[in-house]
């Protein structure tokens, strides 16, 4: 068959029939809707030389059943004209177009107008099975969508919702289910759908996974304590004061009549730099506190061996602080130690502030607080609460009263951080310094909580630097954090540095410290 198009020939343009109106460098064709366009010769395929009177008259009734014709031709090749003769007993524009539909369908035939292949029986059998399966899947999918609309799922529907779960968890960016339901393809929308269908309960929290955060404790091995000298401080009354229910106490305080002792869980004794546990902690950065529990930075075995007060005697890194007449703290000793710690809640400690065991601690804490306030420390009187989700799924919001015992612990830790920063400067020991520029509190603020919140929004974010600068929010000339090495990686690194110093080893360089801390943020 001549494959060059002539005027009034029937051609195939994409998947539509078209009539050649005019030939030339560009060929003008008419489409079924009456629209005329100009195309290149390679953009069209000749189906019949014509003449085509009207594209609306391309209907023809076959004289033979297509399956019977295919059965006779299976495995052979033929032209469109020949297939048209087999099916319609003639080759006209109408029969050419109708025969081509069977080729385009692809079940029995495939190919080009010049060379059409009649598929083998094996191919047709397999294709029929595939099409039946596809039709069944489409029917099942539509039935599933109807059940979703009614909110009545059946067994097996969970498979259809896997992409919605992946989107809700941040593991995918699209969802076929949400798209079919014409809902936004967002994690929030996916989460709501799963809740509405009772596929997820409100206890399932997708946010850690969505942000790539771990949801299980580390499992890295933890060695036993090394055989080394520890100062025996078990005669000192030491108190680990924390919120009720806390299970990882990592600081305790003592008063020996002359000095304030701050005892910190000796994490660096077991978590050496670049060990498996250290690298895991570096990747996590800190404990992850969630309403339904805490995901620790360190393996539970580290807490069992190091947390203060979990055993009759606990290993600690103890800091002895003397206070000058103006309240300035000086770190006079840093030593690995054994301490005997009494654990109590803030409420229990608050009830004992007037007893001999606590009165001196309470007094020095109030003095330290007044000193910071005089140095323009910023105190924001905002309510604090603890949010927890119980095993029963109930959300419990517990107000945290501003107890004086909290001031005792806070000021003791701040004194330790200030003294340790000064110790690092005196000994040319690199440590990460916490700094904060002063805020701009110019202008008027409303009274009460609104004013406090407005001031908080004006606060400049704190930072960790290699050089000591004032911490305006705390009202301290220099400050470093080292009192929570079981909970914060920066504090653990500070302990590793102090351990190197105490052993006489070469300390981490400033760049080494900042690189470790940058990896943990």
Image: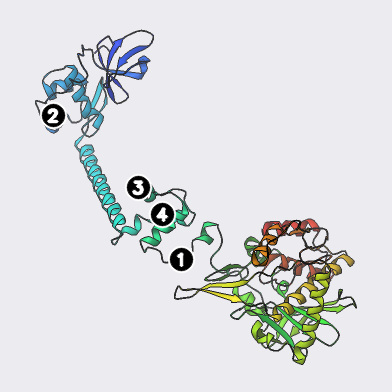
Q: Secondary structure at mark 1?
A: loop
439 displayed left or right of 53: right
- Going 36% across and 19% down the picture, which residue do you hit? 43
User: Earlier along the polypeptide chain: callout 3 or callout 1?
Assistant: 3
Looking at the rendering, which quadrant does residue 448 occupy?
bottom right
Q: Position of residue 20 (x, y in %)?
A: 28, 13
Disc 2 to disc 4, how far (Cα)?
47 Å
Q: For the residues carrying marks 3 and 2, which lies nearer the camera in this image?
A: 3
Disc 1 to disc 2, how far (Cα)?
60 Å
Q: Position of residue 282 (x, y in %)?
A: 66, 62
Label 2 sits on residue: 69
Question: Do the CB atoms of the residues marked 4 and 1 lie less than 8 Å apart?
Answer: no
User: Earlier along the polypeptide chain: callout 2 or callout 4?
Assistant: 2
Q: Which mark is residue 48?
A: none
Question: Do the CB atoms of the residues marked 3 and 4 lie less than 8 Å apart?
Answer: no
Looking at the rendering, which quadrant does residue 41 occupy?
top left
Q: Quadrant of the C terminus?
A: bottom right
Crowdedness of circle 1 by 10 Å Cα count: few (<14), some, many (20+)? Answer: few
Q: For the residues carrying marks 3 and 4, which lies nearer the camera in this image?
A: 3
Label 1 sits on residue: 204
Label 4 sits on residue: 164
Question: Do the CB atoms of the residues marked 1 and 2 lie less than 8 Å apart?
Answer: no
User: Earlier along the polypeptide chain: callout 3 or callout 4?
Assistant: 4
Label 3 sits on residue: 180
Determine whether 465 is above or below 346 in the image: above
């Amino acid at each position: 068959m001549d494959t060059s198009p002539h005027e009034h020939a029937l051609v195939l343009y994409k998947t539509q029939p078209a009539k050649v109106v005019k030939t030339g460098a560009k060929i003008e064709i008419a489409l079924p809707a009456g629209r005329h366009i100009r195309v290149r010769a390679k953009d069209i395929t000749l189906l019949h030389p014509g003449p085509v009177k009207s594209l609306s008259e391309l209907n023809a009734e076959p004289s033979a059943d297509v399956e019977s014709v295919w059965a006779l031709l299976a495995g052979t090749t033929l032209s469109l004209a020949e297939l048209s003769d087999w099916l319609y007993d003639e080759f006209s524009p109408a029969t050419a177009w109708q025969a081509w539909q069977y080729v385009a369908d692809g079940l029995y035939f495939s190919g080009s107008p010049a060379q059409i292949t009649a598929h083998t029986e094996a191919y047709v059998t397999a294709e029929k099975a595939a099409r039946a399966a596809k039709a069944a899947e489409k029917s099942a999918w539509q039935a599933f969508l109807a059940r979703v609309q009614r909110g009545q799922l059946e067994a097996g529907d969970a498979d259809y919702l896997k992409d919605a779960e992946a989107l809700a968890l941040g593991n995918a960016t699209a969802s076929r289910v949400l798209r079919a339901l014409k809902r936004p393809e967002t994690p929030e929308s996916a989460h709501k759908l799963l809740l509405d269908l009772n596929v997820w309960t409100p206890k399932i929290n997708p946010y850690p996974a969505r942000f790539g955060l771990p949801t299980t404790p580390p499992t890295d091995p933890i060695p036993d304590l090394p055989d080394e000298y520890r100062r025996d401080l078990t005669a000192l009354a030491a108190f680990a004061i924390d919120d009720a229910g806390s299970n990882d106490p990592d600081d305790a305080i003592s008063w020996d009549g002359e000095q304030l002792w701050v005892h910190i869980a000796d994490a660096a004794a077991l978590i050496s730099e670049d060990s498996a546990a250290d690298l895991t902690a570096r990747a996590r950065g800190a404990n992850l506190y969630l309403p339904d529990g805490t995901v620790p930075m360190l393996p539970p075995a580290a807490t069992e061996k190091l947390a203060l007060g979990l055993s009759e005697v606990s290993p600690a890194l103890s800091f002895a602080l003397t206070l000058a007449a103006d309240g300035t703290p000086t770190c006079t000793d840093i030593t690995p130690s054994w301490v005997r710690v009494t654990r109590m809640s803030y409420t229990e400690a608050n009830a004992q502030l007037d007893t001999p065991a606590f009165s001196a601690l309470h007094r020095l804490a109030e003095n330290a607080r007044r000193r910071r306030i005089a140095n323009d420390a910023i105190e924001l009187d905002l309510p604090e609460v603890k949010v927890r989700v119980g095993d029963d799924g109930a959300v419990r919001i517990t107000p945290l009263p501003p107890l004086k015992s909290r001031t005792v612990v806070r000021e003791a830790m701040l004194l330790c951080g200030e003294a340790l920063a000064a110790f690092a400067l005196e000994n040319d020991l690199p440590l990460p310094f916490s700094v904060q520029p002063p805020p701009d509190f110019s202008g008027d603020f409303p009274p009460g909580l609104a004013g406090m919140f407005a001031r908080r929004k004006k606060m400049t974010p704190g930072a960790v630097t290699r050089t000591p600068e004032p911490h305006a929010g705390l009202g301290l000339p220099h400050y470093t954090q080292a009192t929570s090495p079981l909970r914060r990686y920066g504090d653990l690194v500070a302990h590793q540095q102090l351990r190197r110093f105490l052993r006489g080893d070469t300390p981490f360089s400033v760049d080494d410290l900042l690189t470790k801390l940058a990896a943990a943020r």
